[in-house]
Image (tube, rainbow, N blue to C red):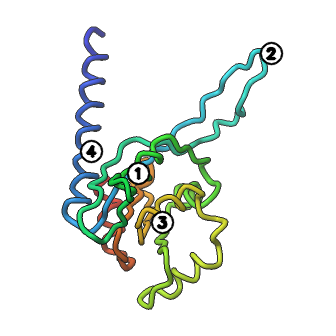
């Protein structure tokens, strides 16, 4: 069929624009500083120089950056570097090269369990159980979250949505909101 490739690419472009606008809208209309969508994809199998396959044949999955939006420092809520660089944007840009194994670690488990996680940098009075989670399982958090928390991010939420995960970060403490979680699941 002639032209179906162009139609598919056009639909994909429209979908990407809609995703980007949804991520942008979340940040501009709420207290979230950044939003990232991680898509679930099959892990590519690569042939090594000796003919051996790297990766397995059972169709293992991974989480890969699809798109993101960061409004960066918008007030004194976030930290400023001495050299004037925005540490939130710096930490945000580092995220784009991350990959996560589906079903493993915090990110992979949220995806496979189709749940959500809310994590705070510091213990809070409004969410004692969540802050205890942060305190008791520091090693279970993705290592790159340290950069985010050091940049001034106070809250990170990860929500299974559509064919992937929505990750949100804020320079403010944002209490867990199940209505928001449900809305995000149906928005993306």
Whichever of labels 4 and 1 marks the residue nearer the N terminus, that label is 4
Residue under label 1 = 92
- Asked whether, in this view, residue 111 is left or right of residue 165, the answer is right
Residue 179, x across and y down, in percent: 31, 74
Which residue is located at x 58 percent, y 83 percent?
A: 132
Which residue is located at x 53 percent, y 85 percent?
A: 129
- Above or below, 108 relative to 183: above
> Could you classify mark 4 by the number of other residues whose Cα lies within 10 Å: few (under 14), some (14-19), or many (20 or more)?
some
Whichever of labels 1 and 2 marks the residue nearer the N terminus, that label is 2
Residue 99, x across and y down, in percent: 55, 43
In which quadrant will I find the N terminus?
top left
Q: Nearer the viewer, residue 167 or 102?
A: 167
Q: Which mark, by number, is residue 50?
A: 2
Question: Which SS class for mark 4?
Answer: helix
For marks 4 and 2, give the CA distance.
41 Å
For marks 4 and 3, give the CA distance.
24 Å
For marks 1 and 2, give the CA distance.
37 Å
Whichever of labels 3 and 2 marks the residue nearer the N terminus, that label is 2
For marks 4 and 1, give the CA distance.
15 Å
Residue under label 3 = 149
Question: Which SS class for mark 3?
Answer: helix
For marks 3 and 1, give the CA distance.
11 Å
For marks 3 and 2, give the CA distance.
42 Å
> Could you classify mark 2 by the number of other residues whose Cα lies within 10 Å: few (under 14), some (14-19), or many (20 or more)?
few
Q: Nearer the viewer, residue 85 or 82?
A: 82
Whichever of labels 4 and 2 marks the residue nearer the N terminus, that label is 4
Residue 102, x across and y down, in percent: 59, 49
Extreme-front residue of the structure: 82
Front of the two marks 1 and 2: 1
Q: Which mark, by number, is residue 20?
A: 4
- Asked whether, in this view, residue 43 is left or right of residue 55, the answer is left
């Amino acid at each position: 069929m002639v032209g179906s490739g162009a139609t598919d690419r056009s639909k994909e472009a429209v979908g990407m624009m809609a995703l980007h606008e949804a991520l942008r809208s979340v940040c501009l209309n709420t207290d979230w500083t950044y939003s990232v969508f991680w898509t679930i994809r099959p892990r590519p199998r690569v042939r090594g120089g000796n003919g051996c396959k790297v990766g397995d044949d059972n169709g293992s999955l991974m989480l890969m950056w699809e798109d993101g939006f960061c409004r960066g420092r918008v007030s004194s809520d976030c930290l400023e570097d001495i050299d004037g660089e925005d540490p939130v944007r710096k930490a945000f840009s580092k995220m784009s090269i991350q990959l996560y194994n589906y079903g493993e670690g915090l990110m992979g488990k949220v995806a496979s369990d189709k749940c959500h996680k809310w994590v705070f940098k510091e213990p809070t009075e409004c969410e004692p159980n969540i802050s205890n989670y942060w305190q008791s399982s520091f090693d279970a958090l993705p290592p790159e979250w340290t950069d985010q928390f050091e940049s001034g991010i106070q809250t990170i939420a990860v929500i299974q949505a559509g064919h992937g995960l929505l990750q949100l970060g804020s320079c403010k403490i944002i209490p867990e909101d199940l209505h928001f979680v449900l809305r995000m699941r149906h928005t993306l």
